[in-house]
Image: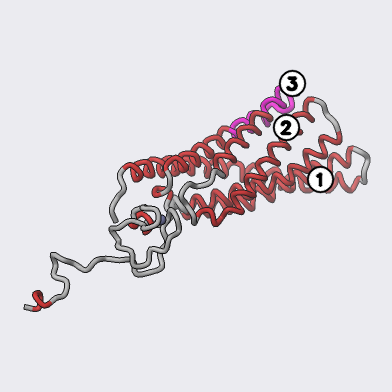
Amino acid sequence: MSEELSPFPPDHPAPAVIETQTFCSSCGYNLHLAPLDGKCPECGTDVARSLQGDRLANADPQWVAKLRTAVTLMLVNALLTFIVSLFVSSAPRSAIALVSAVAGTVTFAAMWLLTTPEPKAWRAEQTLTIRMALRICAVVNFAATLIGAANVVAPNLTLALLTDSLQILGLASFWLFFLFLSRIARRIPSPSLSTQCKIIMWGFTASMFLVIVMLIARAAAARGAAPALSQAIAVFACPAALGILVFAIWMLIVLLRLRTALATAAAQAQQNAAAPQPL
Ligand SMILES: [Zn+2]
């Protein structure tokens, strides 16, 4: 008898609505009191999709594929850098310059892909400053690589100092790169990869900073500066080199795992875009 008195009998349940301040993932429209099975009145995106959070599997599939390609290019670049470091003492200068320029171009392409604006994502664009700063740093880094390559072909003290100084600015690009990757990893979601990106962000940048300071000190020492400078270089050389080695290997492992996770997310995003899933 009580069933008949219920205002919402089982075959006509209460309309489910969003009871909190929830924003459309595509346009930012406030979906408060919108039906769960409805569409955003502003842009037509399924309300259910906005409730799934900012997982990459729910993002634009082509954009996620670009992130995956960017990480693949960074792995290719790591391989090129490794080859250059193996043959740096024996190969002809022109070959070293050419490979460095190619590696720099690959890095630039990767950074550009990585910082492509996410389509239909008003919330992601809140981190606009990091994305834009990374793009600017990528341009500075690219310029440093080209000047560095020119310096290998035609060594010149001005070019050498300019390259080393630009590399310090370029270090900001490494730092931002892993900060950006850390946020991407959080959306996989992979808290472990996200944390590891942050550790590499601090550890690798600190090691690189030591190496670059040493390079500048060495250039100054070559011009006949105080002998104390040479001793300082010797003291910092070992920890800096060890740091670079440890963090470089760790970075390769993280990039490989990130590439696998992004490939999975891109495939899921493709599926979700082809057939929108109900809540
Ligand atoms: Zn909308």
- The answer to which of marks 3 and 1 sits earlier in the sequence is 3
Q: Quadrant of ligand 1?
A: bottom left
Residue picked out by circle 2: 146
First to last magenta residue range: 77-100
Residue drawn at x 76%, y 33% is: 147
Residue picked out by circle 3: 92
Q: Amino acid at mark 3?
A: Pro
Marks 3,2: beta carbons within 8 A: no
- The answer to which of marks 3 and 2 sits earlier in the sequence is 3
Give percent across and percent down for residue 99. Answer: 67, 27
Q: Look at the image and tell me in which quarter the N terminus lies.
A: bottom left
- The answer to which of marks 1 and 2 sits earlier in the sequence is 2
Residue drawn at x 45%, y 59% is: 28
Q: Is residue 179 left or right of residue 207?
A: left
Relative depth, front residue between 252 and 246? 252
Q: Amino acid at mark 1?
A: Ile
Give percent across and percent down for residue 201. Answer: 61, 51
Q: Amino acid at mark 2?
A: Leu
Relative depth, front residue between 171 and 78? 171
| Disc assigned to residue 233 | 1
